[in-house]
Image: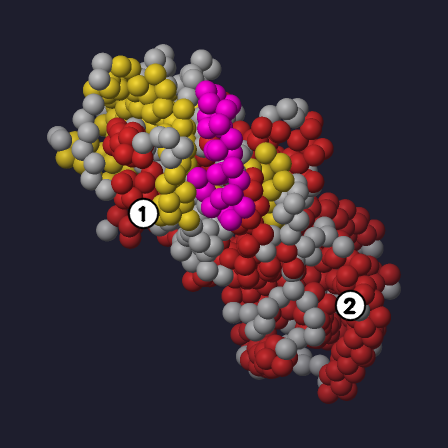
Amino acid sequence: MRATLEPYAKALQHLWPIVFRHVFLLVNAIIFAVVALLFVFGDVQAAVFLGIIIVVNIFLGIIQDFRARVTLEKLQLLTAPRLVRIREGREEMVFVEEIREDDHIRLRLGDQIPCDGVLISSDNLEVSEALITGESDSFPREKGENVLAGDIVTAGSGVLRVLTVFRESRISRMTEEAKQYAATPSPIQRSVRTVVTYAGYALLGIIAFVVIRGVLVEAPAIQIVKNIGALASIIVPQGLLVITTLLFAFGAASYSRRHVLFQEINATEKLGRIKNLCMDKTGTLTTNEFSVEDVHVPPGSSKEEALRLSSIYVRFAGDVSQMVAAVAKFLGEMRDDPQILESLPFSSWRQYGGVRFKNDGRDVSVLMGSPDAFIARLSSGPQRAWLEKLIDANAHQGKRVLCVVRTERMRSLRDLSQAVLSVAAVFVFRSNLREGVRDSINFFQDRGVDIRIISGDNPETVRAIAAAAGVHDTGKVITGAEMAQWSDSDFLKKAAAYRIFARTVPEQKVKIVEALKRDGFTAMVGDGANDALAIKRADLGIAMFDGAPATRQLAGVILMNNSFTALPGAVELADNFIQNIEIFAGTFIASSLLGLFTFFTVSAFGYPYPLTPLNITLINYCTVGIPGFLISYWAVWPSRSAKPAATADFLKRVLPYPLAGALLGALAIGAAFILSPDYFKAAQSNTLVVLAFIAVGFVFFAFAPRVYESAPTLMQKMQIFLLGLADIALLYIVFTTPLLVRFFDLAPQFPPLASIVQILAIALSYAVLLYALVKLLFTKKQRARISN
């Protein structure tokens, strides 16, 4: 029941913002004022009809927006964080919102702490406070210490007593702001807002002109009011921003069929804008499953003793990593119960873990982790040479190694500064490339995307795996040790030159991502807790569903099948959505510009605007509303693969065609007005102008796919033809139904046949000229120039 009602409950929390963005608009304010003035001046029928139209449009917009919100919430519920709550000795999985004060919560590796609280137990628990403080280091936390909501468990485990529920915590507000429904606008949304803003300024200037002109020529007040209402309805493309957001929401729903879940409403656009794609090696290029291929011990060492020490680490360190699980499986059942003095689970920040214990009265420590963490402190030169040779031989084959070392009289497992180490064993692992990963890498590189591999592994291992996956320029390698010498400005200058980043620690991942963002739109793919902050800082974070909960929660996109190979299909769909949003935006903007230019054209001849607000409603249904359904269909069910989304500014790409088409269309509508019979010229509602406007709008839309993508497919041509028939059918119903004639404020008398023929001739002429304009200005070469 909770899973059923939760999306609606969360959507209701956003109901007021949804209502606000549909109701409290400049255009609505003007039209409601027009309705009131129509009542004042006695045109009750027009006032009632216009009031009905505006209320119905607002209501339908709110319903559609709310449904889109519910759809998104249903998808996000799939990845909603769940934690283990302990009550009366029983453990149960609960949602974060169900946690109450004084609840006890079990914390595990990769969890994002959901609430402020105090630790009542700590088993080598370590946390990163990066999301709160911005500092990437990992810190130990002991029993009795406070931890904050938003901290990420990077090692160990513990039990938390909740002091402050999630919704009252600082991180809750931060998360809510980060995942607001369309709260952080995408480039397309920002561009649309710019268009709406400047259109609003233009409308205010035109309203002033209409009022002053009306007063000077002593036009009837009701005519001035209707002109203002009509211009407000046509000039400001206010609905474009809402429709764009709704298309993004529909996109999020359709991606789920491809095993891709969106946690940001505008991630559709972000997927199509990727310039740098950063990813971890393990779990992304390779499978997340390891198996021990071999175990080596230094010459003269006891293999039995090496395996015993390894078993002690596996059993008592509290390490739950995949590699240690593979070692445990390889070792099998080994019983040794030494007196444990200290344990320290593996951490990506340290690159090792350890256990300190009593062995025949001596204080012995066994450590397991990256060879790089130990090699400088080995006491034996021959052992160091042996280890380096072994690492190099396996790294060139793309294999990973895990080193086990021992030492005595170590004061603290966290401090290696005075340790003198000797190698006990080296485990060699094999992991395979994910099926289809090479095709996925080629897909992105063919689009011009730069692939960057950021890993904590040996540089030669990373390079070999990356080369096997088909990554370009794998010779451009740098290690974390080398980057440790870089300043922040060095990262900005140098990071873009490399493709392979090896032996990195989490804070270096963040700096790499931040630097690459200066080079272009950057996405980060990861699954571990050590990827969490880099995913947060990227332009687009992408996480595996089975990854660390914290990483999953911070990502904008989640790969539900845990496979990087799901991403190309999602990007192709993103390309398609972006192209169809461009078509819709072009069509919507063209309609607004056409209304504006028609105003200038008719005003130049000394006539008032020949359309009423209800005329504009009919025009919008035919030129924007009905085509919008077809565009939505093309977006969700593409008839072919779209070309990669353009990197050019959205307005730079979209505006030229509407501007050219509207200028030409205004001349066509002006010709229809001039050729109108005198009684139509004098009427406030010119039926011939209505028909010409609809015809011009349809022709403009028919050529839009050719401009924004390429020649339409045969299926698209058929659908556009059927759309034309739908427009004709709607107009036939309207003009043959007296109630609808009055409702849309059309002239009672139907235009003469000669005038209809003239409209058809004008529309045909416009089609021919627009086609020639498209061929001349929007050829493949010209489109490439605009796109780049």
Distance CA(mark 1)–CA(mark 2): 49 Å
Q: Position of residue 286 (x, y in %)?
A: 46, 51
Which of the image's four quarters has the C terminus? bottom right
Q: Which amino acid does label 1 sit on?
A: Glu
Among all residues in the image, which is located at the extreme left? 88
Colour scheme: secondary structure
Please state the extent of the stretch shown in magenta in the rendering: 372-401
Q: Is residue 398 magenta?
A: yes
Q: Quadrant of residue 690?
A: bottom right
Find disc 2 in the rendering and name its residue: 780
Q: Where 585 falls versus 201 (above or below)?
A: below
Find disc 1 in the rendering and name its residue: 6
Q: Is residue 331 at least partly visible in the picture?
A: yes
- Residue at coordinates 27% horizontally, 44% vertically from top-left? 329
Q: Which numbered disc covers residue 221?
A: none
The overriding secondary structure of the stretch rendered in magenta is helix
Q: Is residue 559 magenta?
A: no
Q: Where is residue 419 in the image (x, y as percent from the top left)?
A: 42, 16
